[in-house]
Amino acid sequence: MKFMLEVFLLLIPLIFGGVLHMVVVTLDLATFLKVPLHEQAFGKNKTWRGFVAMPLLTTPGVYLALWLEKIWGVNIGLSLYHPILLGILLGIFYCLFELPNSYIKRRKGISPGKMSKDNALFHAIFDQVDSGFGLVIIYYLMTSSRAMHLTTFLILGTLIHLLLNYLLYLLKLRKEPL
């Protein structure tokens, strides 16, 4: 039980940041930042707004996880570095690690925001796990999480990401279900 609480603490900042980011996108907030990083390479959906919003919106989730870490009496080292630094790096690495997949999809002629029709399940999973690898790097460097925590985080994070995407789709906060 303690192990799963520790993994859940790692997931909180990203769930928090990701859901709030979808609200920003759906309500079309901060339009002045809605400028593609490089439309030809990554498509129109990878914008500066994401690189600003995700770090800012992930940081409150770090504070929530820190608070729960104390309440639940577990310690995975979320407080080894300043929570703002951890939140900003998590948000930036989340965005950075989405770029290679977007680049590959543009080379394959897949439209921004769409999925490959070939091996759809594989591509849906890969599309969600990519950012998780960046987060694992940050958590490995900045917390006392063990390899088993990070592996479980990657697996559960991908499954939760898929489920949240579908829920956001049902709530009309997302255009595609996966």
Image: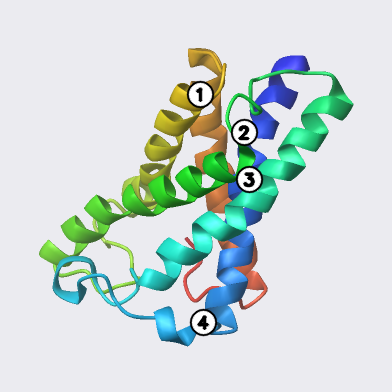
Outermost residue toward the front in this view: 82
> Which residue was labeled with disc 3?
13
- Crowding at mark 1 (Cα within 10 Å: few <14, some 14-19, many 20+): many
On the rendered structure, is 144 left or right of 100?
right
Q: Nearer the viewer, residue 46 or 164?
A: 46
Pinpoint residue 138: horizontal percent, then vertical percent.
Answer: 44, 32
Pinpoint residue 76: horizontal percent, then vertical percent.
Answer: 65, 20
Q: Which of 34 and 40 is in front in this view?
A: 34
Pinpoint residue 172: horizontal percent, then vertical percent.
Answer: 62, 78
Return the disc, 4 or 2, that comes first in the chain's sequence. 2
Return the disc, 1 or 2, that comes first in the chain's sequence. 2
Disc nearest the viewer among 4 and 1: 4
Question: What kind of element bears circle 3?
Answer: helix
Return the disc, 4 or 3, that comes first in the chain's sequence. 3
Q: Which of 75 and 39 is in front in this view?
A: 75
Up-down relation of residue 42 to residue 173 (above or below): above
Tell me the amino acid under the disc marked 4.
Ala
Pinpoint residue 59: horizontal percent, then vertical percent.
Answer: 62, 50
Residue 18 badge: none
Q: Nearer the viewer, residue 81 or 169?
A: 81
Disc nearest the viewer among 4 and 3: 4
Residue 150 badge: 1
Return the disc, 3 or 1, that comes first in the chain's sequence. 3
Task: Report the residue at 40% width, 30% height from top.
Answer: 137
Q: Locate residue 77: give its quadrant.
A: top right
- Crowding at mark 4 (Cα within 10 Å: few <14, some 14-19, many 20+): few
Query: Are the residues at dot 3 and dot 2 in contact (C-beta closer than 8 Å)?
Result: yes
> Which residue was labeled with disc 4?
30
Tell me the amino acid under the disc marked 1.
Leu
> Which residue was labeled with disc 2?
10
Query: Are the residues at dot 1 and dot 2 in contact (C-beta closer than 8 Å)?
Result: yes
Up-down relation of residue 2 to residue 173 (above or below): above
